[in-house]
Image (cartoon, helix red, strand yellow):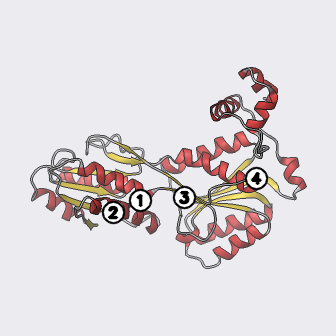
Amino acid sequence: MTSLKDIAQELGLSISVVSRALNLNPDANARIAPHTSQLIRETAARMGYRRNHAAEFMRRKRSAAIGVFVPEFSNRLIADLILGLHEETNLAGFSLQIHSGLDAASYRSFLADHNSLASTGIISYSPRQYHFPEQEEMLREYCASGGKVLMLNNPDEINLPVLSMDEAFGGALAAEVLMEHLECTDLLIFSTHDSIPYSVLSKRSEGFMNRIEKAKRTARQTVSLEEIIETVRHSSSGRCGVFADTDYQAWKLIHQARRAGVVPGRDFYLVGYDNLEFSAFTDPPLTTIHQEFREEGHRAIRILLKIIYNMDFEHSTLIRPTLVRRATA
C-alpha cells in the first residue's frame, strides 16, 4: 500500500508537505502553492494512494461511504461522471456506492438505504423528475440524522448545496456559433422534452434566445423535423441555422435532412448539445456543446468532503461547457 512517505520520496518533498496537501481538513495556516498541491494529488492518484477513514467515521457512528444517485441513462455523460466520482473518491479514501433509476421507487429506496447505513454523505440528481411529494421530507430526515447532501444539475431545486452545468452558457455558445455565419438569418431551436428534465432544456433554450436577442436577432422554437426541412428548402443555401437542444435531436435531423437531399454544413448550419459518443461520426460530423461531466465528478466529491468536514464552500457552483466545432457549423 502506498504511504505518504512513498509519495514524498517520489517528489522529493517532506512528508509534512505531502500530508498537508492531502489533508481533507487542513490547518488554515498550512499553505501550499496550488501547483505543488495539484502535483501531489496527481502523484498520489497515480501511485494508488488511499486514505483510511473507517475508524474516524466509526467513532462518529457513520460509515466512510458516499452514496450517489444518477438517472439510468446509458451514455457517455453518466459514464464520465461516474469515472470522475470514482477517481476522486478513491484518492480521498472513501467508498462509493452507485444507485440508478428513473422512478420514485428507486429514489425512495436509495434514500432509505443510506439512512439505514448512516453513510457519510450523498450526491444526488434532482428528485424533481420523479414527482413524489415525500422526497423533500426524506432529504430533510437524512440531513437531520447527520448525513450531508450535494445535489447535481438542478439549480432550482430545494435549498441544498448544488453543483450544476451552466446550461444557459451552453445555449449562448450555440447561438454565437450560428451567428458567426452572417448569411444565417433564419434561426430555429429544435427542442424535445422526452427524457430530460424540462428545466435543463429550458435553460439551454433560454441561454440561446437571450444571446440572440442581445444581438437584436430573432429565433423561433419547433419540435417538427418537417418544418425545419421545409424552411431549409425555401431558404438560400446557408441562411438557416438550427440549435438542437440534444445530440439525439441533431442526429434525427441529420438523418431526415439527408433523406430530403439537404446537407448540414452546406445547405444549413446545425449545432447539437452534449457531445455524445457518435456525434463525431455522423455524416457530416456534428458541431456540438461539450459538458465536462468527468470534471463534475471530481468537483462533486471535493465539495461534498468540504461539507462533511464543515469547511467553507460555494453553495451553488456552475461548470461552463465548451464548444466542439466540427463540420455542421
Circle 1: residue type: Ala
For disc 4, the neighbor class at 10 Å (few under 14, some 14 to 19, many from 20) is many
Q: Which residue is mark 1?
A: 168
Considering the numbered disc 3 on the image, is that residue within a helix, a strand or a loop? loop
Circle 3: residue type: Glu
Residue drawn 36% across the image and 45% down it: 279
Residue drawn 66% across the image and 70% down it: 108
First in residue order: circle 1 vs circle 4: 4
- Is 16 or 268 nearer to us in this picture? 16
| Contact? badges 2 and 1 (CB < 8 Å) | yes
Q: Which residue is mark 2?
A: 210
The answer to whether residue 195 is seen in the rendering is: yes
Q: Position of residue 268 (x, y in %)?
A: 18, 51
First in residue order: circle 4 vs circle 3: 4
Circle 2: residue type: Asn
Q: Which residue is mark 3?
A: 72
Considering the numbered disc 4 on the image, is that residue within a helix, a strand or a loop? strand
First in residue order: circle 2 vs circle 3: 3
Residue drawn 33% across the image and 40% down it: 281
The answer to whether residue 1 is seen in the rendering is: no
Image quadrant holding the N terminus, namely: top right
For disc 3, the neighbor class at 10 Å (few under 14, some 14 to 19, many from 20) is few
Relative vertical location of residue 44 with respect to residue 195 in this rendering, above or below: above
Find the distance from the CA under tag 1 to the CA under tag 3.
24 Å
First in residue order: circle 2 vs circle 4: 4
Which residue ends up furthest to the front in the rendered image?
Answer: 29
For disc 2, the neighbor class at 10 Å (few under 14, some 14 to 19, many from 20) is some
